[in-house]
Image: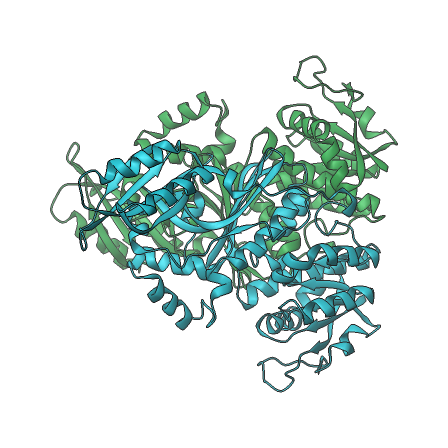
Chain colours: A cyan, B green
Amino acid sequence: MKTIHIGILGFGVVGTGVATLLTRKKQLLESRTGARLNLKTIADIDTQTNRGIDLGSTALVSDAMTVLTDPDIDIIVELIGGETVARKFICQALENKKHVVTANKALLAGWGNDLVKTARNNQVDLAFEASCGGCMPIIKTLRESLVANDITSMSAILNGTCNYILTRISREGCSFEEALKKAQELGFAEAEPSLDIDGHDTAHKLAILNALSHGMEINLKDIHVEGIRHITPTDIAFAKSFGYTIKLLAIGKIHGNHVEARVHPTMIDNANPLSHVDHSMNAIAIDADATGRTMLYGHGAGMMPTASAVLSDIADIARNIISGTKRRVPILGYPEDNIRQIPVLSMKELMTRYYLRFEAQDHPGVLSRISGILGENQISIKSVHQKGRKTNGKVPVVMITHTAREEWVQTALSRISATDSVVGNPMVIRIEEEVA
Amino acid sequence: MKTIHIGILGFGVVGTGVATLLTRKKQLLESRTGARLNLKTIADIDTQTNRGIDLGSTALVSDAMTVLTDPDIDIIVELIGGETVARKFICQALENKKHVVTANKALLAGWGNDLVKTARNNQVDLAFEASCGGCMPIIKTLRESLVANDITSMSAILNGTCNYILTRISREGCSFEEALKKAQELGFAEAEPSLDIDGHDTAHKLAILNALSHGMEINLKDIHVEGIRHITPTDIAFAKSFGYTIKLLAIGKIHGNHVEARVHPTMIDNANPLSHVDHSMNAIAIDADATGRTMLYGHGAGMMPTASAVLSDIADIARNIISGTKRRVPILGYPEDNIRQIPVLSMKELMTRYYLRFEAQDHPGVLSRISGILGENQISIKSVHQKGRKTNGKVPVVMITHTAREEWVQTALSRISATDSVVGNPMVIRIEEEVA
């Protein structure tokens, strides 16, 4: 039986999970792949902390070069995170003709196109199933299963922290701050939560998934990103009364010659299966021309779910090695020469439906003034809702629009904010129609 | 660019779908796989019917031997169905060193172990993503993505006809017969619906999925199978009042040294994501030790979803061919030598909870008599419900049990049926607890 040597860079939570699976599932992995997967070396600056795992003959070293330059090692698993050291090490590993497995979505979203080129130049593989959606096999599904499909639309819940917080607000009617505090206490949110709750982590994943869905270069910078800090229990209560749920969605759609790429809180109909995805769970709904709607659901993060995805990449590469092949499936699902640049649709041009909430003065004529400005901007109102008590002479007024152009909506809202009919900025939440 | 020649056996609905994708998606498939996928020949006894597709240079012949013996052809796609002709042709194709792709679950469930051996002896691939769950990538997920997991439990909705009928009864309160008739009118059920509604089609799929989940031989004959003919609107209404939904589930669980393998109508909690899978949609929930719960959701049947799954197999084999490899992933997920026989747990030994509905005589002492017999058989009652009007002196009495042994439940029910307290046979629906 052939032995395949593996090195891990980064012995944190996921690194410990991967080492645990490689150790504890040694026999299962041998039985399934027909190869001996030997974890030869782990490199981490911290070689002292006890991770509660018996490393056996695996070396724990402080110098990444020990792994990067070891001629025995076939596969290097990067689990350091961040974009500086990790990038340097991955480039070096690829240049040393090592196959690389990583879970680093921020790095891939920012530097993925370059890394794909480096892997190509060195004729090695770069695998990243764990970068998006944790243990859900979304990368494999896009690269291999949906191969005969044109993907028209993807919408996904990709951040467990945000989904946990929104679920908590929805169930308990608490504020965002209270829900965040609870999430931090329970380990569902970081002490510094901005990467998650401001939508950036979701955007990183969308950049990768859009590339794989459409055969396009990874493009992070043109993704429109909004987080969930401003979502209030009032909005969630209104959503419920309409049969809607608010989720932070990553949305990627083909729109003529452009692709939509946006991350923002979204109201979805309760007939949409994503509306039932609660707590810290993740899910991805894909609409494609042959399959229709498919959906994956699972743990989007956590030590063992993420480690499971890393192991599926390791096993894939191991199966390549013992089959005497490599780079069997193109890294981004399409051979590098066939990858296009597809421009991202400007948010101004987005056509969708809107939930608008105004803190309106309780005066005669206010409703007519707001709806007048909307009408002048060609925004047609589907329904108007006024609920809840007057506070300091103001009442919440909610309007649901028909499909309208984002640019017109923003123009109208600026004009409405400038009047004395409303206080503060209106709340805007886009509504995603269920295709059904 | 290498050309890979494909032959199709069976030009029915799915055959037409596969031919359509191979024709219409020629460029996409070339762009993704780096190979030219040429549909050289289709064989079907009916060469006359117009399938509404321009075959171009593809030959349509009436003799399968033209495909089976063509030295050019690399991949043969069997879409005839049934277990006699299809089996003969697949064996011949494998013996002629052709890779085979099939959607034929009945054949695989009944003869899969032999076919796997034939494929091995001839060193070719046998692929069957389309056999279970339509376009959901369940075969790939089990064979490749969950490679480092021990799968503890799988529960799945695998038959769109049954799910459509149950959804319809649930939404409209109609009878099974009315819902079946509607399903037949709309094309969701066959004129001869027994294979679907009596649970056999679901059992075929469970036999395949249990094998892939646990590295065991395909074992159809030991699966316990019940269909949905006997489900009434009364049971569905009771289920709703408990926060439950009734679904026809395929259940496969590891239970000590045995595997559970059963297909029957099941009450599931509305917190279980499977409870929201409605109409003709399919879904599979998998509990595994590293990933926790994951779920796939999608169209389990239909021309294009099934064709999409067939194409993913064709692309996989094409990628093998141009990579100069074959049999890269073992057919059943484990190399043939590592596949075990795992005995199926006898239904008598099943431990689960039960919904029991009796048509009880409206006499004093009846409830005490029923619950007395249950108690003597060590079945402990969690709750008793009596709802609905008395008809001809009889009232429906529903009992929900705590976890009990199937054998004891059956013994108790025989004894209760033999008394004059109840009329007819009691309704028994097993309850599946959400693991959460």
Q: Percent x, y for residue B420?
A: 21, 41
- Residue extending furthest left? B364
Examine the rendered structure and indicate whether residue B30 appears above or below residue A300: above
User: Taking A416 as reference, is B115 left or right?
Assistant: right
Whether residue A322 is visible, yes or no, is yes
Residue positioned 50% across, 25% down in the render: B190
Examine the rendered structure and indicate whether residue B56 appears above or below residue A133: above
Residue B99, picture quadrant: top right
Residue positioned 29% across, 39% down in the render: A370
In this view of the protein, which residue sits in the foreground, B238 or A188? Answer: A188
Examine the rendered structure and indicate whether residue A286 appears above or below residue B307: below
Residue positioned 61% across, 53% down in the render: A220
In this view of the protein, which residue sits in the foreground, A138 or B210? Answer: A138
Q: Percent x, y for residue B171?
A: 33, 34
In this view of the protein, which residue sits in the foreground, A316 or B119? Answer: A316
User: Taking A390 as reference, is B127 left or right?
Assistant: right
